Image (spheres, grey):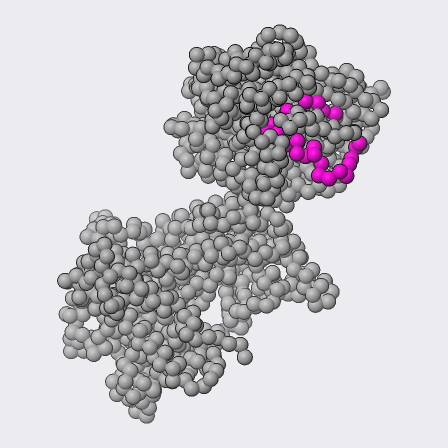
Amino acid sequence: MRVRSSSRLAVILKLTTLQTLYSTDHPGLKKRDELEDMLEERRRSSDARHALRCYAPAVYKGLAPREVSALRGAVLQSDALQHVIGQVSAECGERRELVQEEAAHLLDEMAHRLRLGTVRFFAYVLSKVFKTLFRSVRVNEEGVQRLQQAIQDHPVVLLPSHRSYMDFLMMSYILYTYDLALPVIAAGMDFMSMKVVGEMLRMSGAFFIRRSFGGDKLYWAVFSEYVKTMLRTGYAPIEFFLEGTRSRTGKSLTPKTGLLNIVMEPFFKGEVFDIHLVPVSISYDRILEESLYARELLGVPKPKETTSGLLKARQILREDYGVMHVYFGHPVSVRSLAQGRVKRSQYNLVPRHIPQRPCLAAQALVGEAAFRLVRLQEQAMVLRPWTLVATLLLQNPDGMDLPVLEEQAAWLRRLALSFGAFLDWPGRTCRPVVGAGLALHKNLARVSGGRVRLAVAETPGVGQTAEELAFDRAVGVLSCASYRNQILHVFIRPALLSVALRTANSSRKDEVYTCFNFLWTVFSNEFILCPGASVQDFEEACYLLGKCCAVQESQQDIVMSEGGHATLAFLRALLDPFLQGYQVVCQYLCKETEENLRENKFVPAARNFALQLILAGTLKCYEALSSDLQKNALAALVQLEAVTKVKV
Amino acid sequence: PPPPPPRLRWRSSFEMVADAVYGDAKISRQDIMKWNGWGYSDSRFLFNKKGQGEFTGKRYRLSGMILPSLKDWFEATFGTSLQHKTPATPTLNVSAVPPPNLVEPFVEELKVAGVAASHDPEGRVFRSHGHCLHEIFALREGRIGRVPDLVVWPNCHNDVVKIVELACKYNVCLMPYGGGTSVSSALECPLEETRSVVSLDTSQMNRILWIDEKNLTVHVEAGIIGQDLERQLNESGYCTGHEPDSMEFSSLGGWVATRASGMKKNIYGNIEDLVVHIKMVTPRGVIEKSCQGPRMSTGPDIHHFIMGSEGTLGVVTEVTMKIRPLPEYQKYGSIVFPNFQQGVSCLREVARQRCAPASIRLMDNEQFQFGHALKPQVSSIFTSFLDGLKKFYITKFKGFEPHHLCVATLLFEGDREKVLQHEKQVYDIAAKFGGLAAGEDNGQRGYMLTFVIAYLRDLGMDYYVIGESFETSVPWDRVLDLCRNVKERIVRECKERGVQFPPFSTCRVTQTYDAGACVYFYFAFNYRGLADPLHVYERVEHEAREEILANGGSLSHHHGVGKLRKEWMREAVSTVGLGMLQSVKEYVDPNNIFGNRNLL
């Protein structure tokens, strides 16, 4: 009897998830896979057995896995590397053997040394850690199955979003759990300084690359040949972060194309039939590094990765981080991306081991693909109700009555769903959902006397200066904003349009578009807006706002509809902190008297300028203090040629 | 012991009657050849009442033999059943042939000049096509497209001069026709052609005019068919050594016009290496060199305007070719490799050491299995026991994976001692790449496959299976990538276009050069359930060619461009290159008398 009832419960639970995911009252939403808790099994059976179980993943084309040493030999003896070694030795008059040795040294510094023993150790420890940190880790198992198939058919590149150090540990952990080939992961050199942990990560499949090696030909050759050899031979799935680094703001970062260029080249050169790129969206109820990030954005340097630092971080084990979601997207075939875009025959006339700059079409394709993949990551990112609550709280700094908040959250939920958000909203009622979010994030929001407000200090504490108070507040606001930011990708296009509608001189479409396009250009570093797609984005925005009855379109004009006020006002308010922040940066640059401002001085100076405005009470927007925003604003101004960079 | 007599592959078909009967009104080979399929009418594959494969006729080594494994291979490879047949229209429906568009005074003047001509519908249909899949498929369904309006049979160079003069005078379109083995749509009448189209059949110009033993050259009329040339030279103790796979039916003029390549080019060279002198009749007049010097520095070689011109500039009438004394000894051989990659590495090494035998070819695993399906019934228990033992040795003892191993076939030629020495050298290289000698029989069967494959396509077409072969040449470092990518592209495209069963997509390396290799693809699929199988086929072949070009392969190694591959010419030779060729055409044939519209 008991078993039956619990299994029925499971069915009911499944039904509710299904309903929330492709909610019947919002047809036209993208079909999304169901998510299953992968920790459930871990809570029921032995972690040691899990760590020691037979691990025999399916591999590419059923090839026998290669030894690490064979891979090393293949890279060092490859024509491509030998070619560059010859060049370097001729250029600097060094003996060839010495350069060869140097290359071997670089490779050893870089290369992973995957060992099953270490993987099993991690499998054991991480089982424990994840069960403590997270209530559940929900994974779309269909996506895992697709990935398994893809790994057997083609070389695979895994492209997870990057919000936390947990990301790549979790990725490998999931793949191990589902008996998939473990990825080889490109990691920043920073980890290397953690002696023991660095080596352990290396033995669980991480390889380390220097942050910058622009001019170093030999390093580049070793690195790119290492990656390409693994791809060509189907050695293992390659994993790296398109965003390059962890996003401190909760927004996706503008993708870096360096590694993507490298992994796509074997296809362009015909060395493999196809390569599959698999976007993976990882989202957290609560990010472990939450307040660390806020501090970093405010100029407190990132703590150096040290083993002892890691041990100190044990305290985080005592907290509740809610649910983690991992969504494996559909594999994107490089072949179909390149279809009709890139002429592969351009590589016919030069031996393929000689490095060749990709043609403009290929460069453009890689850039576009990078944006597209980040967009795919964004779209499959599971959004939790708290992101909506945080959004509302930030727009109401004086706090909101709980019933009002609940009502508004319900309204916002409908709006988000109609814009296609992947919102995980258990049940249909609002109260418990909002309540659960507030409970989990009690460090960020406080409920007192039926009123909810951000948990920021009102008055300075004992011995606290006004500056310190402002800093504390900013930490609270930026932490909260990092949750709001997670949902921005859903609203950004309609939000830009809302502001454009307000600023345009008339309701004529072309004028509105001109304003839209200006904003779109200004914010192209702030949000993931695919280069050259402003017309498409405009059309999408018009469509979405039309769909939720906020605007009405005619042949020529676009105007706010009668009931559209609330929606448009909300969307404008969403962009407001960014508009204010950018204005502050502009004000600062206008006032800056120094003839030549050094780039590394810019962020502290701009922050200080904003802080003074806040202290004077003329600026209420704490987000203007964010270094991320300031850098993005500067980049936009450089792009718009309002500011020029000069080499001194 | 005295050396054994030379073993010549063509012995079996040499006993054939002479193709054309001089002075007869019905001068054509069409009587002994299929009108809607490949080769001789008496030779074809079929499944007999017991469901066993069989090859009819008496012309080939395989003729009259039972092939017990063919049915299983055929059904398993294509997912077909012998129950589902797609028989061809048995006879040509003459009434479906469009009436000829004749220029009466032209015909009259031909008659006066004594040139044989006919507008008999069967003869016109026979010369209206090559052997592309779509051409044969249409004929099997009884569909007749645009056919030539008249066939003329010049008897010698001067007849051709007369015909070309008359064609210019009456603005008639001439299309030279040699052996009719084109696989590039080169013989299709252009649909946009409104003039009277005259097929100029060179088959009567088939004499060896002289043999020069001092210089080792032979002067031949260009209409001679490959096997006849070889047979007649053999009688005098010589050979040209030029053996394209189509040599049973293709003509010397056709070889020149398409830049043909022969199986034994490693010893004898390709057509461009063999030719010493060419005489061609063009609308501007006759083009030829003034001497037979073995090499000249007299500007760009005018022979290279002629070779590969695909009948767009004129008719090749006489050719002087190099000849060699018949080799004393011939020996087949074969090598089994654990996988295709090792096989290619071995061929590359053989090419690097420049010690390639007369022929060396590497089949991939699918083709190896295909070859096995064509093994005739074994005669004794002992043979089958021996076969089993060999298989055991290779797969179990040597650890070769039956689904990865592949086979190279070899043909050595020369004096006995050198052949044996050469053989050892090649086998020693092979051993370095894990290759095991696998006997003469396997080698010989491999070459036989070449000649019967075209017959097999007709069998496939009886059972919903269509297919074709195509080729390319590619630098050594790209051979493996190209083979893999093209085969996979074919599989992928078939799937995407609704082909129900995975296609047969296989390749082999058929020639080695210093800087690369020639790769041949076979591609066939079961078209049951497809509304327009031909269209699917053509799209897949098109995509496969795109893939070849993207992977550094050439547009063609020896099949030529014709009309089938014209769309890629600009890309292949650059705009300036194409312009050069066009300006030659403009000068030589301003009125497009040779209007087959190939190449350009």
| Number of marks drawn | 0
Within the image, what quadrant is residue B182 found in? top right
Q: Main secondary structure of the magenta part?
A: loop
Does A204 appear above or below A195?
A: above
Residue A417: x percent and y percent?
24, 58
Residue B126: x percent and y percent?
54, 17
Q: Is residue B285 left or right of residue A607?
A: right
A601 or A329: nearer the eye? A601
Does B542 appear above or below A279?
A: above
Residue at position x 74%, y 30% from top?
B289
Q: Is residue A348 left or right of residue A53?
A: right
B161 or B318: nearer the eye? B161
Is residue B373 visible to the viewer in this orientation of the structure? no
Asked whether residue A559 is drawn in magenta, I would say no
Residue at position x 38%, y 28% from top?
B531
Residue A374: x percent and y percent?
40, 59
Residue at position x 24%, y 61% from top?
A508
Is residue A558 visible to the viewer in this orientation of the structure? yes
Q: Quadrant of the C terminus of chain A?
A: bottom right
Asked whether residue B301 is drawn in magenta, I would say yes
Q: Which residues are magenta?
A: B292-320
Within the image, what quadrant is residue A391 found in? bottom left
